[in-house]
Image (spheres, rainbow, N blue to C red):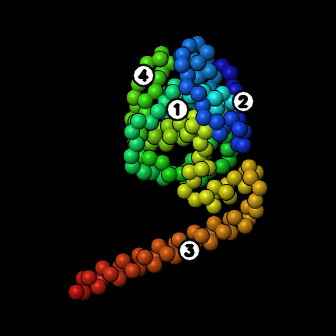
Amino acid sequence: MAQLKLRYYPDPVLKQKAKKITIVDGSVRKLAQDMLDTMYKSDGVGLAAPQIGVSKRLMVIDVSSEDEPAKPIVFINPEIIEQDGEMVGQEGCLSFPDVFFEVKRYSRVVVRFQNLKGQTLKLTAENNLLCRAIQHEIDHLDGQLFIEKAVSQLKCDLEMTKAGLIDGDADALSRELSQQSSQVAAATEGETIKLKSDKKEHILK
């Protein structure tokens, strides 16, 4: 068992597209196990090889709860071959400590990958954490980061600023976000009132 050193934003390796693994051998299996050990010790649910400084298309995921036995999945050369729908939910990332915000993802994906035996498999995930984790980790393999897919760029900037990952005025960003939320709430309330009014007019007619 080995705990590897995590790479944190803005480490350049996180923006590199990882290379395909051509041979599944003992070195790949050891790397996968070390990645799982690192992920578990870091309280993560997913980890991609670039996050430990290795630019290879390898990722590990385990979305089982604390009350369940571990259910690790090792993905070698994963590729999403089907995707549809939409879901929004909060995400974090081991390479971005203490940063959390909402990200839009596909609600259903089919991923093709190789396992540690070199066998090619397909897996479908829909409307769950596994579905979200698969997309998040494959993004890492493509040099894409979840900060690029935030639902609210303002919320993302606030979280990044509070974590010390970018320069900025957290208080000012917080006030701007609060003002924006109030405006959205007011607009939504106005639309609801209009819908009720239209419905009442339609009934009266």
Q: CA distance from mark 2 to mark 1?
A: 19 Å
Q: Mark 2 or mark 1: which comes first in sequence?
A: 2
Mark 1 surroundings: few (<14), some (14-19) or many (≥20) residues within 10 A: many
Do we see residue 65 in this rendering?
Answer: no
| Residue pointed to by mark 3 | 183
Give the percent coordinates (x, y) of residue 12. Answer: 71, 38
Q: CA distance from mark 1 to mark 4?
A: 19 Å
Q: CA distance from mark 3 to mark 2?
A: 43 Å
| Residue pointed to by mark 4 | 120
Q: CA distance from mark 3 to mark 1?
A: 39 Å
Mark 2 surroundings: few (<14), some (14-19) or many (≥20) residues within 10 A: few
Examine the image and state in which quarter residue 202 appears.
bottom left
Identify the residue shown where x is 76% and y is 62%: 169
Mark 4 surroundings: few (<14), some (14-19) or many (≥20) residues within 10 A: some
Q: Which mark is residue 62?
A: 1
| Quadrant occupied by the C terminus | bottom left
Q: Residue furthest left?
A: 205
Q: Mark 3 or mark 4: which comes first in sequence?
A: 4
Q: Relative to residue 57, is residue 193 depicted above or below?
A: below
Examine the image and state in which quarter residue 119 appears.
top left
| Marks 1 & 4, CB-CB < 8 Å contact | no
